[in-house]
Amino acid sequence: MRLDEYLRKRDEFALQEKRFNRVYLPVFFGLLIGNLFVVKAIPESWGGWWLYLIGFFALLFGNLWFTTRREKRRVAEAGLNCRSCRRPLVGVPGDLAVTTGRCASCGGQAFD
Ligand SMILES: [Zn+2]
């Protein structure tokens, strides 16, 4: 992949992520804030607090799992992985690859 092709793909990837985050982040933080109201409305005598806590932490860690898997899949679909070691070339590793022409993980040539 040539540098100009990589830059075009990276810009397109960033734009799609921005669009996704415009919806995803308000929903996620809305659930977190909504949780405060739900907790306040539950009577203290309710015996299912442990179940609620399990559900809440399942939401938090499930979110972490979902976003990590989604990003890996999206990077691979966009073709933004290093061609030598297959590590993602987005964010700081991508900036380093653009600046140096080499993958920050393996040192292999990032572009043609
Ligand atoms: Zn590499």
Image: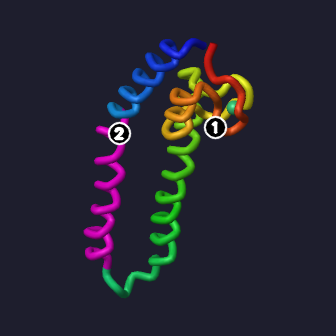
The one of 67 and 50 positioned closer to us in this rendering: 67
Binning the other alpha carbons within 10 Å of mark 2 as few (below 14), some (14 to 19) or many (20 upward) gives: few
Give left or right: position of 87 versus 64: right
Dots 1, 2 in contact, CB < 8 A = no
Mark carried by residue 48: none
- Name the spot of residue 61 as percent of width and height, x first: 53, 58
Instruction: Residue 41: name its quadrant.
Output: bottom left
State the predominant SS element of the stretch in magenta. Answer: helix
Q: Secondary structure at mark 1?
A: loop
Q: Relative to 99, does residue 55 appear above or below in the rendering?
A: below
- Name the spot of residue 66 as percent of width and height, x first: 53, 45
Q: Quadrant of the C terminus?
A: top right
Binning the other alpha carbons within 10 Å of mark 1 as few (below 14), some (14 to 19) or many (20 upward) gives: some
Ligand 1 within 8 Å of the CB at mark 1: yes
Type of amino acid at the residue the image marks with label 2? Asn
Residue at mark 2:
21
- The residue at 49%/38% (across/down) is 91
The one of 112 and 91 positioned closer to us in this rendering: 112
- Part of the protein shown in magenta: 20-42
Type of amino acid at the residue the image marks with label 1? Ala
Q: CA distance from mark 1 to mark 2?
A: 27 Å
Residue at mark 1:
104
Residue at the limit of the structure toward the bottom, as seen here: 45
